[in-house]
Amino acid sequence: MKRLDCLKAIYPRLEGCAVVTIMGAVAAELYSLGHRANFFYLEHAMGLASSVGLGIALAQPKRKVVVIDGDGSVLMNLGGLTTLARSRPNNLVHLIFDNETLLSVGGGAPGGYKWFTTATATGTDLAGIARAAGFPRAQMVRELGDFEEAALDAINGDQLSCIVAKVDAEMPKSFLIDVHMLENRFEFPRALQTKGGVN
Amino acid sequence: MPVSVANSQVVYDAMKGVGITLLSALPETWLVHLIRMADEDPAMTLVRLAKEEEGVGVSAGAHFAGARSAMLLQNHGFLQAINGIVGVSLLYKIPLLMLITDRGSFGEKDPWQTEGGKYTRPVLDALHIAHADLRRPDEVQPKIDHAMTLAQASLSPVALLLQRDLMWEEPK
């Protein structure tokens, strides 16, 4: 399963949501589908995308928040899953693309070769961890159809959800994001705080 | 417990007074009443963190969503959160108000608190984070107000160091 195909499957549904992605391949591929002001690409600060999402979800309980995370980042803040679970915002969906490698920080190579894997390559089950942390819904998917169904159902639903998608460790076609970090940083809250923008 | 309830209330009321509606925290002895007050206040969202760095992300999210927030932490919590402070608050220019109980200075009886306190100010200074001490109850409200004003205007982290004289009452 390819990350880009997963993103294409949910892209139309992200309108009106607050979308927080991690750095690297996920951000670049979401950007490549068409940037929107309600997308925030958290460069650096690995592990904190879900914490940023939590802050938004608690401050704007009527807005759907979609965090698009990765296995390497989540593993840097496993405690954050417990904070999400105990805070249990019913408007937050945590999507995790699990390519079993630290692809975007140099752990991957062209052709999908994984030379620096994460622990999910050796059996760590992030959906299992989320479930055990207390997420009311957590599941792992391996097929595009299953991802689309699970992710859309979670976004349309009203409970804290974690969907872990096993994807290929493929580099994006380009890492280009032609929106400066600070431009993104200022347009994002403006989109979230504009009246009528609530999903 | 000889943590000052009255002065904790002064700090809590001052935070409410500057519009804070979300607090993220990890406990430490001097913070027990502040955290309890947040927990008992239906108008306050209290986020119980597993580790302090998460709170930097939570505060950034709250800021994006238009809410004012603060973090309650201790010296070692501040040191733990450095990467988040640099990678989120400083890099992205996001206001972050930190109330740090400043353990390990004069009068500290717990040997394990004596190291972290030594580095808090030098690290704040190294990061060019504005900071001030809160020592007397009468200075709490104006300094919290000024700290929040500066954080919002400068889009930066600002720290207030809660001192023993304010937070602790020696048993008589």
Image (cartoon, coloured by chain):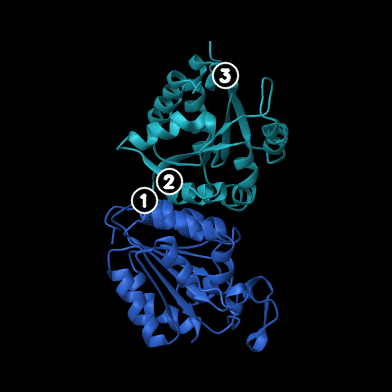
Chain colours: A blue, B cyan
- The reply to whether dot 2 and dot 1 touch (C-beta < 8 Å) is yes
Foreground: disc 2 or disc 1: 2
Callout 3: few (<14), some (14-19), or many (20+) C-alpha neighbours within 10 Å? some
Q: Tag 2's secondary structure?
A: strand
The chain letter under disc 2 is B
Q: Which numbered circle lies on residue B47?
A: 2
Disc 3 with disc 1 on a shared chain: no
Q: Give the structural element (helix, strand or loop) at label 1.
A: helix
Give the Cα distance between marks 2 and 3: 26 Å
User: Callout 2, which amino acid?
Assistant: Val
Residue occupying image coordinates x 52% and y 82%:
A167
At 47% from the left and 60% from the top, the residue drawn is A81
Mark sitting earlier along the chain (2/3) = 2
Residue of label 3: B135
In the rendered image, residue B168, in percent from the top left (x then y), is placed at 54, 20
Front residue of B104 and A178: B104
Residue placed furthest toward the bottom: A111
The spot of residue B146 in percent (x, y) is 51, 27
Q: Which numbered circle lies on residue A58?
A: 1
- Residue at point 55%, 73% (across, down): A124
| B155 lies above or below A117 | above
In-front residue for pair A119/A16: A119
Q: Is residue B69 visible?
A: yes
Residue B41 position (above or below residue A103):
above
In the shown orientation, is residue B125 left or right of residue A44? right
Q: Which of the pair A193/A111 is nearer the observer?
A: A111
